[in-house]
Amino acid sequence: MERTRRSGVRRVHAHVMEVTKITEYIKETALAAGFELAGIAGVHDSPELDYFPEWIASGYAGDMHYMEKRNEAGDLKRGSLQCVAPWARSVIVCAINYNTEQPYSTEVAAQDKGWISRYAWSREDYHDAVMRRLRTVEAKIAAAATDIQTRCYVDTGPLVERVYAKYAGVGWIGKNTCIINQKIGSWLFLGVILTSLELTADLPAPDRCGSCTRCIDACPTDALIAPYELDANRCISYLTIEKRGSIPEQMRDGIGRQVYGCDICQDVCPWNRKAPSTSSPEFQARPELVNPALDWLAEMKIEEFRQVFRGSPVKRTKLSGLRRNAVIAMGNSGHPEFGETLENLTEDEDPVIADTARWALRKLCG
């Protein structure tokens, strides 16, 4: 067996299993590795992928310029797998449930506490937890096939995972742009394995959103500009995680108490009413991250930030971003006891924090 580590591509020469049988074998292996769902999508262009360049051209990606990367021919890499993996013939899509038993953000009335998105409550970064399972599946494929290539991605590859998840039958793309499964809901982490094997593709999942618009109606910042269309510039998840520097003032009221990500459009989704809770230990919630104290986050120092969020996806927003978000939430809280803390933060050495604290103090004082 030979593996090219730098490119992430695995080349295998081993005992061969008939391709007509390996499709089901792969799905069984995925379930045995801890995934709840697994399906196969073919490598082909789709209407959803055709829309992606238009979405980029409209500026809806905000400052996420990595989505705009192009190949030498000028084509968007995320627009077609042929640009980045011309050898790929099938996409194996695996999904795992990360829902926990804690109440949804829409069920919690404590405005003096912050809200960290459900997926970031655990101690281990989901990228690592999902990739570990994908590697197990990949190794099983390597032992069953011959002269193939594979490559694994967990939310970091140049492809639109949810499109392939739809065509793999894992779930449909909801009006909030999340993948929704009829039985499990939308609290799903996706992982994909590209392979040069010609596998039997599944049927795409039918759209079961119907006439429901609860996610669109519930979005506080009107980020869902139309069914299935998201303007990241207005999305609370984008603003609190990806956006660097100051958040535009006109967007701050809508952020509410969200300090990292946002679950609102999923919380109100009818398909999540009876969503099961995960049994995976990696995704269990850390109590201190469920409804965290806003003043704790706003005054956090770098050493504590590194210790508390070691291995956590919350690191992506960086300390400055997390503190900025907490200050905005304090301004939105309506709780005057935050006044003294905000007054002190107006003199913070971080100019973004200081400026945001002045806004929050004005907001708090009416």
Image (tube, rainbow, N blue to C red):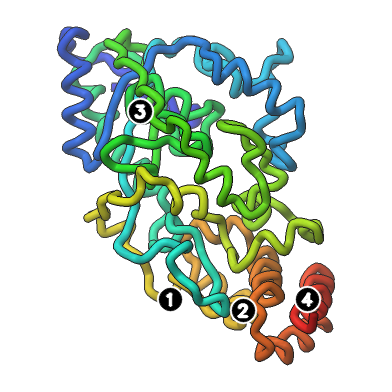
Quarter of the image where one finds residue 56 = top right
Q: Earlier in the sequence, mark 2 or mark 1?
A: 1
The residue labelled by disc 3 is 93
Nearer to me, 111 or 314: 111
Going by the numbered disc 1, the residue's amino acid type is: Glu
- Label at residue 363: 4
CB under 8 Å between callouts 1 and 4? no
Would residue 36 be seen by someone viewing this image from the given angle?
yes
Going by the numbered disc 3, the residue's amino acid type is: Val
**Label 3 to label 1: alpha-carbon separation:** 33 Å
Give me the residue at 33% from left, 51% from top.
Answer: 273
Question: Of the residues tagged 1 and 4, which is closer to the observer?
Answer: 4
Instruction: Identify the element where label 4 is drawn.
Output: helix
CB under 8 Å between callouts 3 and 4? no
Q: Mark 2 packing: few (<14 Cα in 10 Å), some, or many (20+)?
A: some
Instruction: Identify the element where label 2 is drawn.
Output: loop
Query: Could you say where residue 151 lies in the image, as x and y percent from the top left?
Result: 41, 26
Q: Earlier in the sequence, mark 3 or mark 4?
A: 3
- Label at residue 300: 2
Going by the numbered disc 4, the residue's amino acid type is: Lys
The residue labelled by disc 1 is 288
Give me the residue at 52% from left, 11% from top.
Answer: 45
Going by the numbered disc 2, the residue's amino acid type is: Met
